[in-house]
Structure formats: structure tokens, C-alpha cells
Amino acid sequence: MAQVVLRNLRKNFGDTEVLKGINATIADGEFLVVVGPSGCGKSTVLRLVAGLERITEGEVHIGDKLVNRLEPKDRDVAMVFQNYALYPHMSVYKNIAYGLKVRGIAKREISQRVDQAASLLGLSPFLGRKPNQLSGGQRQRVAMGRAIVRKPRVFLFDEPLSNLDAKLRTQMRVNLKRLHQNLKTTSIYVTHDQVEAMTLADRILLIKDGQVEQLGTPEEIYKNPATVFAARFMGSPA
Ligand code: ADP
Ligand code: MG
């Protein structure tokens, strides 16, 4: 069970208040998409959940645990970035397996998990290839494979598709949707792409200037935007 609770989450960088008290409860198994203009604090929210930045004030709970003081490695989350780096000299198999190997997981278990992830991501035929023998979309799927094999309680995605061309993005959206239906891992997914948000989200968290502008299902926000800003952002009819 891994619901994620953000309670009055605040983050300052120097004198700048970047997050001004974010409240949200992400249900176990929910796919939450975080949207908002560039610089509004989306990545910062993810980094606070992952433990990559110190929380200024407020709380992050994962499952029934307050994780504010836990190291990233003890939070049982996996993050997928836009600029993922694969090891160029390693095969797809080894790239996916790497994080398990360093955690001392047995070879047979690793092989089972990699095969399962590869099959979910449509990468089974490519396990022997090197990254430079893959397309951009395939490489991004390898990056996701690395996160999946760890079987984290929470996935954090920071604009993972924004470097792909439009056609691949559409294809990856379908992949991601299917993946979530299979794994049902609680996910927080940042994007600035409204279509991506509408298709992937159970609920959307719209942030403006470090504050929650609206939190609701795609339909709720689209049909009943709380503010003019929300309406504009979601492209709701006037
Ligand atoms: P988003 O992901 O929504 O584009 P970010 O969360 O990356 O926004 O950043 C929010 C604000 O915080 C921006 O104004 C950014 O410049 C600032 N910021 C982010 N990280 C740092 C940092 N390490 N030091 C100083 N300011 C930062
Ligand atoms: Mg960002």
C-alpha cells in the first residue's frame, strides 16, 4: 500500500518561495499528473518526494511513513527523467539489470524481473543490443525498464516524453497507460503537455506559482475549471 500525502509542502531556494504549501493525497495505485507553467514548481514537488531536495516545511508521507528525513534510497521510489542516461557500453539487458545488481539481488531473480519488464515494454527482442542500436523511443523504454525492475512503491516521472517526436510520444502514451494498468503502481507524472495529462491522468494537479490551482479528474477540470487560469490551461470551452 503506498498512498502519497503532501501536507502543506513548502520549499524555499534562498529567499525565493518556490512551493507555498502544497496539499494533495495521491491514492494507492493512482496516476496523478502534475501540470502547470514552466517554473511553477512541478519538478521541485517530485524532487521533494524523491528526497533529492530538503523540505523547507511540511510533510511527505509514503504509505504510512513520514519520509522527510529518509535518504532517497530508503524511500522506495523510482524516478524517470527526460534526460535519462544509459550506459553505452552495456547491453539493454545489463542497463535494465544494473540497479538490481548493485542492490545484491540474486541472478535468477534479476533475470525474471528484467524479462518481465522487457515484455511489458515491448523490449524483449532488443535485450542484446547496445543503446546506440536503438531508436529514441526504445531508449526511453529502457530507462523506464530500469525503474520498473526495482518494483518501487511509487513512480516519479519528470517529463519523460518531452524529447521524443510527436508520433513516438503518442505511442509511448499508450505504452505508459498499459504499463500502469498492469502494475498499478502509484505514479506522479509531470508534463506540460495537456493531451498527455488528459489521456494518462486519474486526476490532474494543476500548479500555478507554487500553489495548487485545482485538483480533480481531467473531466472535472476541463468541464468545471476553478479559475480562468485553469480554463485557459486546460483549453476548456469559454
Ligand atoms: P518546473 O518543473 O515547474 O518548470 P521547477 O520546480 O524546476 O519548475 O522550478 C521552480 C522554481 O524554482 C523556478 O523558478 C526555478 O528557477 C527554481 N529552482 C529550482 N531548483 C532550484 C535550485 N536548485 N536553486 C535555486 N532555484 C531553483
Ligand atoms: Mg521541471
Image (cartoon, helix red, strand yellow):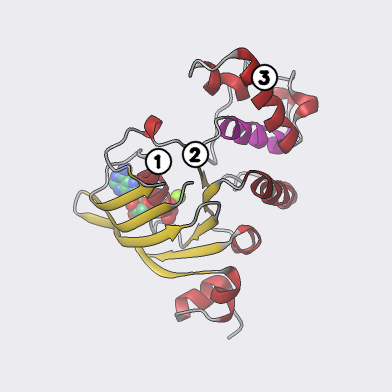
Is residue 209 visible in this depiction of the protein? no
Q: Does the magenta-highlighted stretch encompass residue 179? A: no
| Callouts 2 and 1 close, C-beta under 8 Å | yes
Q: Give the residue displayed 60% in from the left and 21% down from the top.
A: 97
Q: Nearer the viewer, mark 3 or mark 2?
A: 3
Task: List the single residue furthest toward the left.
Answer: 15
Query: Disc 2 marks which amino acid?
Result: Met
Q: Give the residue displayed 63% in from the left and 57% down from the top.
A: 200
Label 1 and label 3: CA atoms lie apart by: 27 Å
Query: Disc 3 marks which amino acid?
Result: Ser
Q: Secondary structure at mark 1?
A: helix
Highlighted range, magenta: 135-149
Label 2 and label 1: CA atoms lie apart by: 8 Å
The reply, left or right, for residue 219 in relation to residue 48 is: right
Estimate the x, y position of residue 36 in percent, counting from the top left: 47, 62
Label ID, residue 111: 3
